[in-house]
Image (tube, rainbow, N blue to C red):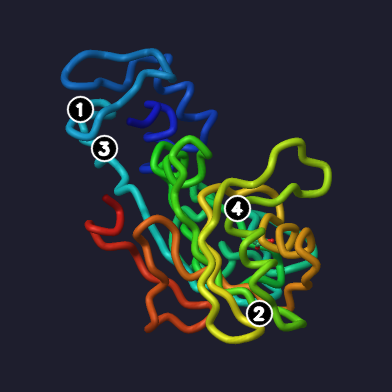
Amino acid sequence: MIRLDKLISNSTVFTRSQTGKIIRKGDISVNGSIIKKASFKILENDQVQYLGVEINLPKTRYIMMHKPKEVVCSTRDGEHQTVLDLLFIAKRDSLHIAGRLDLDTTGLVLITDDGQWSHRITSPKHKQAKVYRVSLEEEIGDKAIKQLEEGVRLKGEDKATLPAKVNKLDSKTIILTLHEGKYHQVKRMLVAVGHHVVQLHRQQIGKIILDDALKAGEWRELSEDEIA
Ligand code: URA
């Protein structure tokens, strides 16, 4: 579902304000009826025409990127390169990031122009698993692992974190699976159990696993299965 004005400005050469004017003028029809409301919702199989000429609905885009360090997860930044700067595709302005990573974190970032889909990925209600490989400065013991698994109180928060899963890869590296996404959550959880994260890498969100074939800075479109 997409708003009529958004669909037209995403799929044609008309600017936002030109789009508003042609809709109000009655130049746009949806399934044969003139529609003058910019917020009218368009569904996947609707036929939209401008003065009788069909406008193809834009294909919704779903992208996975292997985010490198020192690239910022925002659409604009005065200082650093952004993940969108790494995408050489048209209409980048309509894309957004579904779940940000810190500047020094690497790994899986999902980028889309489907707001409902990204809401399912990021909303706490849907509890999508996020899997991180966490490298620590010091060796981690069983007590700290148990605390992480049971939930810890982060500085400035009233409630403990949800139960997490920890797999120890070696004395200073764990795989941490979370079902929530508070601000700087991994680093803050590790601080709460007396540890300092030296490297953080996201491997997976829900069932979407970062493709091994993607080097840092590379991206590809998601498959139908991954989108579903
Ligand atoms: N938790 C963090 O602390 N940083 C990230 O980039 C992601 C999760």
Front label number (3 vs 4) = 4
At horizontal 23% and vertical 57% (from top left) the residue drawn is 224
Q: Which residue is mark 4?
A: 150
Front label number (1 vs 2) = 2
Q: Which residue is mark 1?
A: 52
Q: Which residue is mark 2?
A: 135
Which quarter holds ligand 1? bottom right
Q: Nearer the viewer, residue 149 or 190?
A: 149
Q: Which residue is mark 3?
A: 55
* Mark 1 vs 4, N-terminal side: 1
Local SS, label 4? helix
Q: Position of residue 215 (x, y in %)?
A: 48, 84
Q: Amino acid at mark 1?
A: Gly
Q: Amino acid at mark 2?
A: Ser
Q: CA distance from mark 1 to mark 4?
A: 61 Å
Q: Amino acid at mark 3?
A: Ile
Dot 2: within a 10 Å radius of its alpha carbon, few (fewer than 14), some, or many (20 or more) residues? many
